[in-house]
Image (spheres, helix red, strand yellow):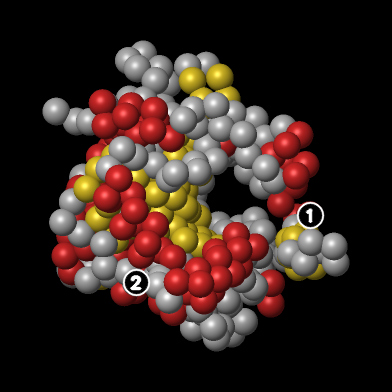
């Protein structure tokens, strides 16, 4: 992999990731952009103890532009985008409308491919492997920034999720705090260790593999299953069999096998609801251990959580009173049924 770092016209960092060492990335951003001015703040809720990012400048962000004005496509035919090159493999740049900025963290956009009409599931294994390398590299670099406590790589796909740009892309958030969801996992991890002397993540994976009814896909280095208490109608958790705290810890075997496993999962998601259905909207989220913390963070297990808000053909799972008001999920699809369906739609 070759990484090339450059700057956009307003000073934001742009990174190209190429599979070939002889790739040349010397295109200059000619746009007359003003320096970015953000108003991001982190405010702590005194009742819940969690943090909220206040980012009023995001109200003016780009919203569903026509394909020929997509800011994530390469620059060509006299039209300048966020990526000055006429083509690229994987590109990462600082978000122009970040939720987190300065002392409040950092937000980056990850463009998986220059093909506007593709999706992650359309990538080759080689392309998906390059995205994994980019995620890993960004995790390593962002972890070194002063004040960053956790790095979150994720993809939102589909208008139902709230995506405002159709180009295949994801994001990376570098939080200046440990997220509430991770803090809950760390507390459960500590309690389980105190009670049993064992690692909670190891026990969860071992239980799912032994039971087998919710296992969707298993390789030499990865296992994917619908969790016993799945929150979402179709939800899959993907774990490396050798526990590591974050993407940096994956060995060569896990890195080689990941594209095969992950691309198959995404393609199965698109077949859940049968032929003729639109692409399945989903959120794909890497959970990594926080940095600069003592306690049980080193015992955390890297894993990816993939889920859709679609519960059946033409119907969405809305977070209504119980979910939004009290954070108590009600799932209409039994996890065992979801797992069986995801096995049923395996590639031939």
Compared across the picture, whether 327 is left or right of 316 comes to right
247 or 335, which lies in front? 335
User: Which residue corresponds to mark 1?
Assistant: 56
Q: Nearer the viewer, residue 20 or 179?
A: 179
> How would you rate the neighbour count of disc 1 (Cα within 10 Å): few for under 14, some for 14-19, many for 20 or more?
few
Q: Quadrant of residue 124?
A: top left
Residue labelled with disc 2: 244
Instruction: Name, please, the residue furthest toward the front.
Output: 195
Q: Measure the C-alpha gap from mark 1 to mark 2.
A: 37 Å
Give residue 336's position: percent from left, percent from top: 38, 33
N-terminal label among 1 and 2: 1
Residue at x 67%, y 35% (from the top left corner) = 319
In terms of depth relative to the viewer, which is nearer, 82 or 245?
Answer: 245
Above or below residue 188? Residue 162 is above
Instruction: Provide residue 64's location: percent of width, then percent of height.
Output: 58, 34
Callout 1: helix, strand or loop? helix
């Amino acid at each position: 992999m070759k990484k090339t770092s450059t700057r956009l016209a307003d000073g934001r960092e742009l990174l190209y990731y190429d599979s070939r060492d002889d790739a040349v990335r010397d295109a200059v951003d000619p746009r007359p952009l003003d320096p970015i001015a953000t108003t991001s703040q982190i405010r702590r809720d005194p009742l819940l103890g969690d943090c909220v990012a206040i980012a009023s400048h995001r109200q003016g962000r780009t919203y569903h532009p026509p394909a020929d004005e997509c800011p994530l496509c390469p620059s060509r035919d006299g039209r300048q985008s966020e990526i000055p090159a006429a083509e690229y493999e994987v590109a990462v740049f600082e978000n122009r409308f970040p939720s987190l900025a300065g002392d409040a963290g950092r937000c980056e956009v990850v463009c998986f491919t220059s093909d506007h009409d593709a999706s992650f599931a359309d990538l080759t294994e080689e392309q998906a492997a390059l995205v994994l390398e980019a995620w890993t590299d960004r995790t390593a670099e962002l972890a070194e920034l002063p004040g960053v406590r956790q790095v979150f790589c994720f993809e939102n796909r589909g208008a139902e999720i709230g995506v405002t740009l159709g180009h295949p892309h994801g994001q990376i958030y570098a939080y200046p705090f440990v997220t509430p969801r991770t803090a809950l996992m760390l507390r459960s991890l500590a309690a389980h260790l105190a009670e049993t002397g064992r690692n909670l993540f190891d026990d969860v994976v071992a239980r799912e593999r032994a039971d087998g009814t919710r296992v969707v896909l298993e390789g030499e280095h990865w296992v994917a299953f619908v969790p016993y208490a799945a929150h979402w109608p179709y939800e899959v958790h993907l774990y490396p069999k050798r526990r590591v705290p974050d993407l940096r810890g994956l060995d060569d075997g896990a890195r080689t096998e990941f594209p095969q496993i992950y691309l198959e999962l995404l393609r199965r998601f698109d077949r859940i609801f049968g032929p003729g259905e639109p692409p399945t909207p989903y959120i794909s989220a890497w959970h990594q251990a926080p940095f600069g913390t003592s306690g049980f963070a080193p015992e955390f297990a890297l894993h990816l959580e993939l889920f859709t808000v679609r519960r059946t053909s033409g119907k969405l799972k809305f977070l209504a009173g119980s979910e939004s008001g009290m954070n108590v999920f009600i799932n209409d699809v039994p996890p065992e049924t979801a797992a069986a369906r995801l096995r049923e739609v395996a590639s031939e």
